[in-house]
Amino acid sequence: MRIVLTGSSGRLGRAIFNILAVHHSVVGIDRSPFSTTHLVGDFTDTMVLRAAIKGADAIVHCAALHAPHVGTVSDDEFRRINVEGTRLLAEMALAAGVNRLIFTSTTALYGHAVIPGRCSWIDEDTVPQPKSIYHRTKLEAERMLEDMSGPDLQVRVLRMSRSFPEPANLMATYRLHRGVDIRDVADAHAAALTNGGDHFQRHIISAGTVFKPEDCEALAVDAASVISLRAPGLAAKFAQRNWPPPQRIDRIYASKSAGCVLGWHFRFGYEEVLAQLERRSLEVLPPFSQDNKQPE
């Protein structure tokens, strides 16, 4: 397949490129040059898009403004890139006969569905309650693509959970309920290129949780006890390192469809986080290195 990849110089874009380029011809677009990028420019530039899309079989769209841009980039610019840029990409795909578009979205747009003092069980049926302009524009783009999807444009929306480098103690715990390895996210994008089913699909991409819905009440007040029950291996690893376990967990991202519909399963759990820490991988930060960071 010939695949157009937007955001190809970013961390996720590079991971997707590495997965896809083994078996496909990938054309990367990004405003920043990198070895995975062939066309340096804004994906909202029609001339850049026209050159890239010609003869393409699919588009993987992961370019966007993200949470770190909130407060430093105007709301209008968020809409131009995240919404209108996505609209332009979909319209040009339709015009060029490209019939598969993969859209990278985020579990962050559930926003206020996470209730302070409680542990929220979140799956694809949970109604998003976005907080910021980032969340709102991603959700708006999702809904626009749903309206545009059909036999001529099959759309797969992937709501990915946390996958950026963080302190090892946080990342390891997050792999139980709200985190995912960037390589697993890339695998999900590859799976979304060829799976069958409805013209429009939306999937949560997060490492499989060991918790159950009935654990939520206890997780909100005594997460350590539940972790000892459900994930004794992680509890033992924390004890060996004298790391205190988390006392509260406020959400669980549980995909209902990624396995059975998308055909995707995560590969890298908390064990990989600890292994990456041991080999000094840049993907994992030293434990407790952000203790002074303000809470989300």
Image (cartoon, rainbow, N blue to C red):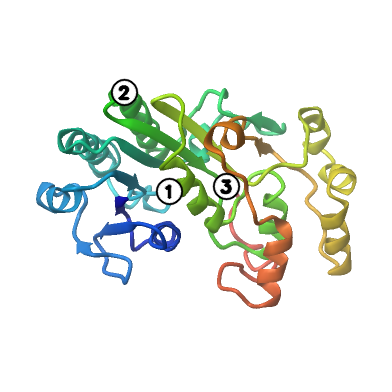
Distance between the Cα atoms at labels 1 and 3? 11 Å
Sequence-wise first label, 2 or 3: 2
Where's residue 14, x and y in %? 40, 63
Residue 142 x %, y %:
37, 31
Mark 2: give few (<14), some (14-19) or many (20+) Cα within 10 Å.
Answer: some
Observer-nearest of 293 and 170: 170
In depth, the one of 13 and 292 nearer the eye is: 13
Say what secondary structure mark 1 lies in. Answer: helix
Q: Which residue is mark 1?
A: 67
Decide which of 261, 106 is in the foreground and name it.
Answer: 261
Q: As drawn, is 9 to the left or to the right of 95? A: right
Q: Which residue is mark 2?
A: 150
Q: At label 1, which amino acid type do we have?
A: Ala
N-terminal of the pair, mark 1 or mark 3, is: 1
- Neighbours of disc 1 within 10 Å: few (<14), some (14-19), many (20+): few
Q: Amino acid at mark 2?
A: Gly
Graded by Cα atoms within 10 Å as few (under 14), some (14 to 19) or many (20 or more), the crowding at tag 3 reads few
Q: Residue sitting at 50 percent across and 27 percent down? A: 128
Residue type at numbered disc 3: Glu
User: Which callout, 1 or 2, points to the residue nearer the camera?
Assistant: 2
Residue linked to disc 3: 296
Task: Answer left or right for 95 relative to 268.
Answer: left
Q: Nearer the viewer, mark 1 or mark 3?
A: 1
Q: Which residue is outermost to the bottom?
A: 279
* Residue 81 percent coordinates (x, y): 26, 44
Q: SS for tag 3?
A: loop
Q: Residue at coordinates 67% horizontally, 37% vertically from top-left?
A: 251
> Where residue 77 appears, x then y in whole percent?
24, 44
Residue depicted at x 19% and y 33%: 91
Taking 246 as reference, is 83 left or right? left
